[in-house]
Amino acid sequence: MEQAIEQATSVEALLKKRPLIISGPCSAETEEQVMQTAMRLAATGKVDIMRAGIWKPRTRPGSFEGIGTKGLPWLQAARKESGLPVAVEVATGKQVEDALHFGVDVLWIGARTTVNPFSVQEVADALRGVDVPVLIKNPINPDLELWIGAMERVAKAGIKNIGLIHRGFSSYGNTEYRNAPMWHLAIEMKRRYPELLMINDPSHICGRRDILQEVAQTAIDLDFDGLIIESHIDPDNAWSDAKQQITPEKLGEMISSIRWRKEDVASEEYHAALEKLRQQINNLDDELMQILSQRMKVAESIGKYKKDNNITILQTNRWNSILERAFAKGEKFGLSKEFVTKYFDAVHMESINHQNKIMNS
Ligand code: PEP
Ligand code: MN
């Protein structure tokens, strides 16, 4: 009893630590692996909580689907020996019960579960009346409402200590990332729920070791509260997610070489300089809006001519030539092709909407 109370209060305090660092294997594999990982992570002095997957939601059948409940006593032993609190992923009510029975300190809901309101509700129902921190990964698809919905279901079950994990979003085809970060979605969640812990999961965004550090750095530059990064005593031979895991020592080095940023500084000179530059940004943004509004007026005039002559709104040749010009100019002005594409898509769509109103009025 005494120990249980101590556990609850200290973990609550623990989640307030900044930066919060969680690390451990994608999956618990053997008792020895769990114990060694915990001891080596603790030895780095950089890790606050150890993670380990016990039940693994794998995309295809036939890959390692987790050691199951049998691994929970291993975590308990590793926790005792290393002093590191432990976190596991839960996807069903039974998994919640088992994890809590074996004294798991922090639970997280995985990306494949967040997408499914039935599963999230089942997990939430099992959490009723329990005081355990719950971290919620973003859903695999870029849908903020699902992420918010999962958070609300867990909150309604009475869980007070809720955090979010940004692990990127899946997309079709091979890209640089295993899961596209789409940072703007995490930024929007931070804007809407500034009080919630938001940590980044570079491992599942990258899917490979070589770019972990730069993604972790980006998250810290964006003022995330912490990181969850997979580590393994023998990464190449891990039973799941081998390509993205690193040794506990490498993890320690990575955390040491991240450039930690402060959110603010008490310097009048800094604030005055920033204020001046921000005023410039505001002025430029206002000008851009005015110019965009002028552009829409011109598009509307074109719409009137098209209407009078019964011509289609979309002229693919014209659109191609707009884009070609834009790419060339963009390069000259140091704007990335990705940005120019997104910007012109948005401007073009808005012009079409304005013309549509004219043509069908
Ligand atoms: C994991 O953390 O090992 C995992 C399965 O991640 P995700 O839910 O982000 O796919
Ligand atoms: Mn994994």
Image (cartoon, rainbow, N blue to C red):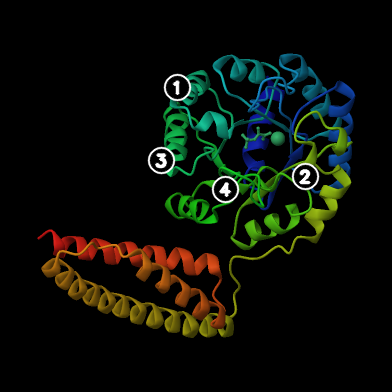
Is tag 3's residue or tag 4's residue first in the polypeptide sequence?
A: 3
Residue type, mark 1 in image: Phe
Q: CA distance from mark 4 to mark 1?
A: 24 Å
Q: Where in the figure is residue 309, as x and y percent of width and height? A: 14, 68
Nearest to viewer (mark 1 / mark 2) = 1
Residue 233 visible in the shown view: no
Q: Where in the figure is residue 272, as x and y percent of width and height? A: 51, 84
Q: How many other residues sit within 10 Å of disc 2, few (<14), some (14-19) or many (≥20)?
A: many
Residue beneath disc 3: 145
Q: Where, by quadrant of the figure, is residue 240 drawn? A: top right
Residue beneath disc 4: 198
Taking depth in this image into account, of 112 and 251 the one nearest to the observer is 112
Residue beneath disc 1: 118
Nearest to viewer (mark 3 / mark 4) = 3
Residue type, mark 2 in image: Val
Q: Is residue 11 left or right of residue 208?
A: left
